[in-house]
């Protein structure tokens, strides 16, 4: 009797765990540091002199974006830079100041997922194909 390999599933589970830990760390740091949009948005501009704040802003957006991609909640196009994504998040905060009192990584997650939703491929019956990873051949 031959057993079918679950290597693809194992890889997806691994990516999901990494993404969940990344999001949890970002949310924990936000809660500890009080990183609302109000506290972070000033550090996200190119003219900031606070490199620690700038690093937090870039890292939070990059971490959230990576977590969303790995879990299939966003499909950021190839070639989009972290800087472009940060500008998009800041623009949304400028347009919607009511979001400034929300946790910055959570707001960034909503903005990124809204801008680049994953549109699943459909099978021949019109149902979404839910496999987010390419087929991986067993060794």
Image: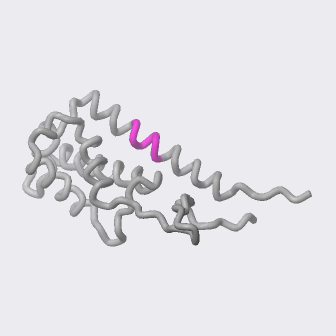
Q: Which residues are magenta?
A: 19-24
Task: Work out which residue is located at the far top of the displayed protein and give it.
Answer: 32
Task: Work out which residue is located at the far front of the displayed protein and give it.
Answer: 125
Residue appearing at x 28%, y 42% in the figure: 105
Which image quadrant for residue 84?
bottom left
From this view, report whether residue 59 is shown above or below residue 25.
below
Residue 60, given in percent of the width and then of the height, sits at 29, 46
Residue 86, given in percent of the width and then of the height, sits at 21, 56
Residue 123, given in percent of the width and then of the height, sits at 56, 68
Q: Nearer the viewer, residue 3 or 17?
A: 3
Q: Is residue 22 magenta?
A: yes
Residue 79, given in percent of the width and then of the height, sits at 32, 72
Q: Is residue 81 magenta?
A: no
Quadrant that contains the C terminus: bottom right
Side of 123 relative to 29 (left or right): right
Residue appearing at x 22%, y 61% in the figure: 83
Quadrant that contains the N terminus: bottom right
Residue appearing at x 51%, y 47% in the figure: 16
From this view, report whether residue 128 is shown above or below residue 51.
below
Which image quadrant for residue 65?
bottom left
Q: Nearer the viewer, residue 48 or 67?
A: 67
């Amino acid at each position: 009797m031959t057993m079918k390999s679950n290597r693809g599933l194992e890889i997806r589970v691994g990516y999901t765990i990494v993404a969940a830990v990344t999001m949890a760390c970002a949310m924990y740091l936000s809660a500890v540091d009080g990183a609302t949009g109000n506290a972070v948005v000033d550090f996200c501009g190119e003219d900031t002199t606070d490199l620690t704040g700038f690093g937090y802003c870039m890292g939070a957006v990059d971490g959230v974006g990576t977590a969303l991609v790995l879990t299939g909640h966003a499909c950021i196009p190839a070639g989009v830079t972290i800087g472009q994504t940060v500008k998009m998040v800041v623009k949304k905060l400028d347009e919607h100041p009511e979001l400034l009192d929300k946790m910055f990584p959570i707001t960034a997650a909503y903005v990124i997922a809204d801008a680049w939703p994953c549109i699943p491929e459909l099978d021949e019956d019109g149902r979404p194909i839910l496999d987010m990873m390419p087929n991986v051949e067993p060794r």
